[in-house]
Amino acid sequence: MSWYEAPNALVAHAHPDDETLATGALLAHWVQAGASVHVLTATRGEQGEVVDGPLTALEGTDDLHRHRVGELAGALAELGVTSSAILGEPPARAEGLSPRHYHDSGMRWVTATVAGPSDNDDPLAFSTADFSEAVDDLLAWARTVRPSLLVSYDSHGGYGHPDHVRMHEVTLAAAERSGIPMAEVVHDPTKPYDHWFDLDDQFDRLVRALRHHASQLTVTGHDVVHVGGQRDPIRTGVGLRLLTAG
């Protein structure tokens, strides 16, 4: 069997909603194919804006991150994923260390589609946290679930968000230390990839999962409208490019 077919996959993301936006169709496909799928989320999306409406009052409050963890749980259940963890919390915490809370680093738009670091100077921000500690935390969960494949963003983090870039770096370092193969997610079929999945059959399930992230996005037809007003097509096609072969 090829490395991308029904693997025991640990899929590492930065914030609640990334798992569905970037890899939701793939996660559902793998689950239906009998794979073991484990989703790791680094932060709780504390810095994110909130969609106008009944949830707007959550923005900037301590209740926001708790709400977004609940949204994450609902989306994962819709995708069929039953194994998940938050980085810094057992079992995704290095042995002997007290639990820690990696904070959303925030971002700013450099162009209409490319993000960059914000002015956030939070000492607990994921993008500036101790790098080796974050790698150790990811590896702690890997020792529990014993994945055959690690999956995360490309080196640009998909669109430049500093937490996405850091998660790529952390996952790659974990792959190199552990010998577990790592693949990066590719959304543009004109870019290099090793395998492309056309997963239109997962569209309805993906839409239901996306609707759980109501504080961050709105589903409109075949598109997602983000809280900042950006509109993207719902992605059912996704590629993987193998970075390390283990």
Image (cartoon, rainbow, N blue to C red):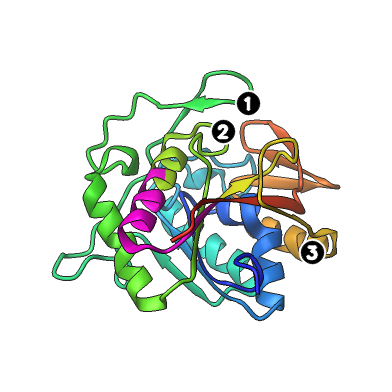
Mark 2 — residue? 159
Mark 3, Cα crowd under 10 Å, few <14 / some 14-19 / many 20+, is some
Q: How far, Cα to Cα, is label 3 from label 1? A: 26 Å
Which of the two discs, 3 and 1, labels the residue nearer the N terminus? 1
Q: CA distance from mark 2 to mark 1?
A: 7 Å
**Amino acid type, residue under disc 1 in the picture:** Thr
Q: Quadrant of the C terminus?
A: bottom left
- Residue 105 appears in the picture as rendered: yes
Q: Nearer the viewer, residue 201 or 208?
A: 201
Asked if the residue under mark 2 is in contact with the one under mark 3, i.e. CB atoms within 8 Å, the reply is: no
104 sits to left or right of 220: left
Q: Secondary structure at mark 1?
A: loop
By secondary structure, the bulk of the magenta-drawn segment is best described as helix
- Specify the amino acid type for callout 2: Tyr
Residue in view at x 80 percent, y 60 percent: 199
Q: Specify start and end residues of the magenta stretch as a single range.
A: 169-183
Provide the residue designation for mark 1.
113
Residue 156 magenta = no
Q: What residue did someone put label 3 on?
A: 202
Image spot of residue 239 (x, y percent): 68, 50
Badges 2 and 1: C-beta atoms under 8 Å apart? Answer: yes
| Spatial CA span between label 3 and label 2 | 24 Å
Can you say which quadrant of the picture contains the N terminus? bottom right
Residue 107 point in image, percent of width and height: 45, 30
Query: Foreground residue, 62 or 180?
Result: 180
Mark 1: give few (<14), some (14-19) or many (20+) Cα within 10 Å.
few
